[in-house]
Image (cartoon, rainbow, N blue to C red):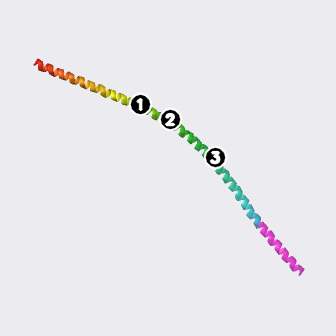
Amino acid sequence: MNFAIEITIGLLLIATCVYCIMLNRKLQKLRDGQAELTATIDRFDDASRRAELNLNAMQGAGATLNRDLAAAATRANALIDELSVMVNAGDDIAGRIEGAVRDVRTIGARSNRLAS
């Protein structure tokens, strides 16, 4: 009977050792997966930092372009105002020239009538 108990205990010890070996392999795979996960998280962190730097650079460039565009729009509005004044002055001058031409033609027509 003692021999049967010792054999049973020996078999249980062998089964425990086999289970421990299997458990050790699974734990090793888990550790390997943890290392891969850590490496992936590190790469993601690096990519997010670069994205943040690029975003800040783009915001700065956008602000500069916005200022430049606002300045160009201000200059364009000033030119529009100047051109409007020039066009109005040109219209006035053209009207005066038209009137002078009309007056000259009228005088010329009168001269021709008197001379005939």
Q: Position of residue 13 (x, y in %)?
A: 83, 72
Could you say whether the residue bearing mark 3 is in a helix, strand or loop? helix
Q: Amino acid at mark 2?
A: Asp
Q: Residue at x 33, y 29 (%)?
A: 88
Magenta residue check for 10 = yes
Name the residue furthest bottom: 1
Magenta residue check for 77 = no
Classify mark 3: residues with Cα within 10 Å, few (<14), some (14-19) or many (20+).
few
| Residue labelled with disc 2 | 68
Q: Position of residue 85 (x, y in %)?
A: 36, 28
Q: Amino acid at mark 3?
A: Arg
* Range drawn in magenta: 1-21
> Real-space Cα distance between discs 1 and 2?
16 Å
Q: Position of residue 76 (x, y in %)?
A: 43, 33
Q: Are marks 3 and 2 in contact (CB under 8 Å)?
A: no
> Real-space Cα distance between discs 3 and 1?
45 Å
Could you say whether the residue bearing mark 2 is in a helix, strand or loop? helix
Q: Amino acid at mark 1?
A: Leu
